[in-house]
Amino acid sequence: MFIKHATIERNAILLLVLALGAISVGGLVEIIPLFTIETTVEHVKGMRPYTPLEQEGRDIYIREGCYLCHSQMIRALKDEVERYGHYSLAAESMYDHPFQWGSRRIGPDLARVGGKYSSDWHYAHLKNPQALVPESLMPHYAFLADSALSYDNITDKLHTLRAVGVPYTDEQITNARLDLETQANALADPAALLARYPKAVSVPGNAKTVTELDALVAYLQVLGTEVDFAGTNEESLQQ
Amino acid sequence: MPTKIEKDSHTGTETTGHVWDGIRELNTPLPKWWLYVFLATVVWSAGYFLLYPSIPLGGHYWKGLWGYSSRGDAMAGVAAIHEQHAAAMEQIAKTPIADVEKDPKLMQTALVAGRITFANNCQPCHGQNGSGRVGYPALGDDVWLWGGKLADLETTLTHGIRSGDPDARVSQMPAFGTDGTLKPEQIQQVADYVGIWWGLTGKDVDTKAGAAIYAENCVACHGEKGEGNRDAGAPPLNSKVHLLDGTRASIVAQVTHPQMGVMPNWNTRLDPATLKSVALYVHSLGGGE
């Protein structure tokens, strides 16, 4: 041995550097392959960035701490697939900063809640969950219906997300405010919105102000609906 | 720090040679059994690496000789569950709905399938055990909008109500208020008349005008005594079991600009055997005819 054990133990800096190196190996061999292996993030059709309203709803979701009780991660276990639908893919969180996988399920998993209930149901349920599900432990979020959504910085928000890798186009960023208001108004023509963001669900709203509840429902309604599973070969997802 | 390795006189084991404040440490060797188990796990890991997905290889990774994948495993499990159900569900599919009831074992399967499917898909609107809520009919009572026989239930479940399905059940109540057919005061009068059935209208209220308006506009669908008409999908009005919240204001609102419920056509999401099971389950809730 060219460095004696006694030498290392008697030199604090050398011990620190070598310990750091040894520990890093453990991390690096686990992390680096995830960047090189092509199937780490599956190649699937249909994923798109969140619409401005969904993005705002996502921020409300985080602000209210929904992730503390709801996971967004259907594990590859048959019981979960039976109950919630197709297991979650890495590709489905690739535009999430940060992802909302969560680690507790006091309420049900929400990874594929989009489209499972009507928007009206979500409005009623968020205002008073026990009115629809008597045994529910969920708190009431009726106040969201009275809170006007603050979206003055939506354009900056999309710019920031683009800086960290979400592929918003210039067109999507320019029209952010318009798209947000369109999606929160059931009477508005959603054609342009849908061209920019396929499958975006317009929420009923109250036609006067865009509320935080509108944003949250729009977000919930898109969860897990984007990937085109019919056009995906199940074999290609297996890893 | 002296590093003199010496034999401990008490135990006969060598010391590490380190001395701190006069305290020396024994260099007791690992127990043999522990060492061999450790070496065995090292050998085991080599086999594990070979059989299971393990080593990253640039853009790919070693998939293992057994080709195991946790995702594939989960999907195979799901397929196995479906296969397990397939025999019973096929039998339910080919048995006419009325005959399923006659086979206790088949009926039991159908009720379990129906209950689980109901809890997942129907409960959000119709409530637990079909208890219903404002705007969404209760399913455990004797009052039916479109009929409570097994065949009626199966049709409603399959094609839905105002769902856009070509065979959906469709009815339309005119918007008497917004269309201007009735004046606001006439709507108040007819609400007084309908309110008799719900115990909302006192005996001292004169309901003659309301009765006349009812006879002219409402009888055709809702019937002379407010008994409703299932063929037209007109709910009975003389029952305290109804879709509104039971206030006079709700009657006025309904006559002015009616709310008409929508039920999805489940044939796009559930297979015929499951639909049949749900019909049997709903029929069993207490109101089945």
Image (cartoon, grey):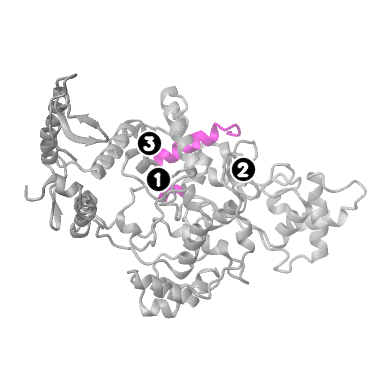
Dot 2 corresponds to which residue? B132
Closer to the camera in the image, A17 or B10:
B10
Dot 3 corresponds to which residue? B93
Farthest left residue? Answer: A1
Which chain hosts label 1? A
Judged by depth in the image, the label closer to the viewer, 1 or 3, is 1
Establish if A194 lies above or below B203: below
Please state if B145 lies on the left or on the right of A98 as rendered: right
Residue B286 colored in magenta in the image: yes
Identity of the residue drawn at 32% across and 35% down: B81
Secondary element at image label 3: helix
Q: Are marks 1 and 3 in contact (CB under 8 Å)?
A: no
Amino acid type at mark 2: Gly
Quadrant where the N terminus of chain B lies? top left
Q: CA distance from mark 2 to mark 1?
A: 24 Å
Does mark 3 fall on the same chain as mark 1?
no
Establish if A77 lies above or below A189: above
Dot 2 crowding, Cα within 10 Å, few <14, some 14–19, many 20+: many
Q: CA distance from mark 1 to mark 3?
A: 25 Å
Judged by depth in the image, the label closer to the viewer, 2 or 3, is 2
Dot 1 corresponds to which residue? A84
Secondary element at image label 1: helix
Q: Are marks 2 and 1 in contact (CB under 8 Å)?
A: no
Quadrant where the C terminus of chain B lies? top right
Amino acid type at mark 3: Ala
Q: CA distance from mark 2 to mark 3?
A: 28 Å
Dot 1 crowding, Cα within 10 Å, few <14, some 14–19, many 20+: some
Q: Earlier in the sequence, mark 2 or mark 3?
A: 3
Secondary element at image label 2: loop
Which region of the structure is painted magenta?
Answer: B266-289
Which chain hosts label 2? B
Closer to the camera in the image, B75 or B155:
B75
